[in-house]
Image: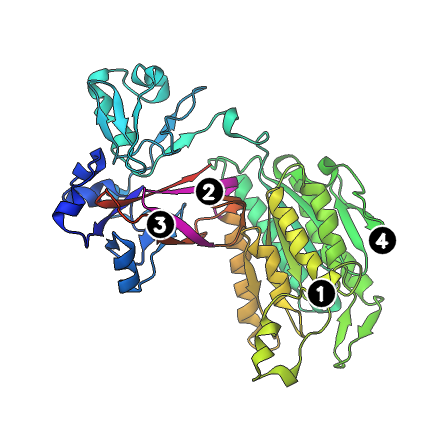
Amino acid sequence: MMMWPLYNSYSQKEETKKEKPLSNLNLEPQEMQTKSCSNNYISTSLKTFPKTQDLDLQAKLPLSVTIQPFAERKKEMKNNQDIPVINYGKENFVRCECGGYLNPFVQPNFMSFHYTCPLCGTTSNFPEWWINSNSQSGYQGNNMELNKRVEFSDSVIEFQANSKYQNRQTSDPIYFFLIEISEYTINNNLVALMCKSIKKWIKSKLIDKEASNSQSIKVGIICFHSVVDAILIKKKSKRPEIITLGDLTDYFVPCPTKSCIVKIKTHYKSIYSALQLIPEIYKKKINHQPIKQSKDQQSTSESCLSFALQISFGFLNSVGGKLICLIANRPNLSKGMLRNRENQELVGSKEESTLLNPEKDSIHGQFWKQIAKKFSKYYISVSLFLFPFQYLDIATFAQLTHYTAGELFVYDNLSLQTAHKLRSFQRQLTQLLNREDCWEAIIRTRISYGFSIKQYFTDCLISNDDLLYVPNISPDYSLNIQLQIHSKEIISNYLFIQTVVV
């Protein structure tokens, strides 16, 4: 929760025509800074916002807010204390009619047990169970100490939600790896390096037993080239079982999800063995892999990436998770095959910008947007590691990360600074796997009366004006909101913003 002062262009008489409780809310600058959250979480384009539409038009300045929900706190803020945790048990959250949660800027009246919401100005009663709540909910149970509760003292709070706020049962963290097997990825040791990084990450997670989710992590692996190979990892098996799907027109999941996605705690030996053998197995096969010659005389392997994504979706749609892809070739098989749109004649012309936009003209081009939205709907985040040695149509690929809150890494032309780029790939993959993420999240941002959200700028699927479905939120994830003034007269002297991640 954060607040900013509003600059008023009306006279004092016009300002006091209509009085509400919020118009009497006057805070000292130091008190305002103390009660507001750190700028690491919420920052704005202006320190003071206009209070009227006329002043907004005259200023011609963008009214925007940048929100980073899981930003790490600076040491000098809040004395580096941990975020307080509140558990209401089976009860619902204490909320206003507008949906706002309790925060340090509400105006409580502990004599009559009601409060005024800073977002809408509505007066609501405190629930009886909240007033008499015991220590199991994190309180002292003393009415004289209601004003000391963390809802009124800290702007960043973690609420432990009950089953009422869950769309489905919480599943274990799942990391699903989609690895392209081609002459380029094998000969440049990309497959071997990725397998090595995954093994190192699994080993660190098994050692770090203090981590809350390290023992429940699950992994799955699919390799693809001209066909799709699902890697089945069986317990106490020294060699993985490979199911090959060669008919790209017949989409089906070849085995139950639990056969392809396994826990690292119980299957770590088999996972190690599989990751050790994958580069060796496919290095022998790649010599017999048919090579296709492209129009620009560059050798390119056949790639059924789109079909592999569909198979991956079949494994993950019931559990969600993070899909991490290693890609070097443009998909040229099955639905979703992409053509080479590179056209030197358009360079310098008005139509040059079309080369930077996703392909939408053909059915194959529309496939990528459709499957990206499908992934987001089922809380599957997609991150791509691209190694283009020729035209790859990254603009179309980027839709996978854009709609699923994933990340896109590009390492072009490995012939230059090869060692440096491979180290960067290994470092960024390790960082992606090791960081603490929030899974299957919904973000809702509420603005105080007089302002509204005009537009969102972020990587996720936006359902309506204030609800964002984010499959995966990392500490690096952020969103930008453009605000607008929709009321001719704003009674409050401050702008309040509250963001909730569920």
Q: What's under tag 4, amino acid-wise?
A: Thr
Residue 132 counted in the magenta span:
no
Counting residues from the N terminus, which is met first, the one under dot 2 or under dot 3? 2
Mark 2 Cα-neighbour bin, 10 Å: few <14, some 14–19, many ≥20: some
Counting residues from the N terminus, which is met first, the one under dot 2 or under dot 1? 1
Kindly identify which numbered label has been placed on residue 186. Answer: 1
- Disc tally is 4
- Relative image position of residue 262 (x, y in whole percent): 67, 38
Kindly identify which numbered label has been placed on residue 486. Answer: 3
Which residue occupies 59% across, 29% down?
Answer: 169
Counting residues from the N terminus, which is met first, the one under dot 3 or under dot 4? 4
Residue 448 counted in the magenta span:
yes
Counting residues from the N terminus, which is met first, the one under dot 4 or under dot 2? 4
Which residue occupies 84% across, 68% down?
Answer: 290
- Relative image position of residue 323 (x, y in whole percent): 63, 49
| Residue contact between numbered discs 3 and 4, judged by CB atoms under 8 Å | no
Q: Which residue is mark 4?
A: 249
Kindly identify which numbered label has been placed on residue 268. Answer: none
| Residue contact between numbered discs 3 and 1, judged by CB atoms under 8 Å | no
Q: CA distance from mark 3 to mark 1?
A: 58 Å
Q: Which residue is mark 2?
A: 443
Q: Nearer the viewer, mark 1 or mark 4?
A: 4
Q: Report helix, strand or loop for mark 4.
A: loop
Q: Which residues are magenta?
A: 435-457
Q: CA distance from mark 1 to mark 4?
A: 27 Å
Along the horizontal axis of the image, is 169 left or right of 368?
A: left
Q: What's under tag 3, amino acid-wise?
A: His
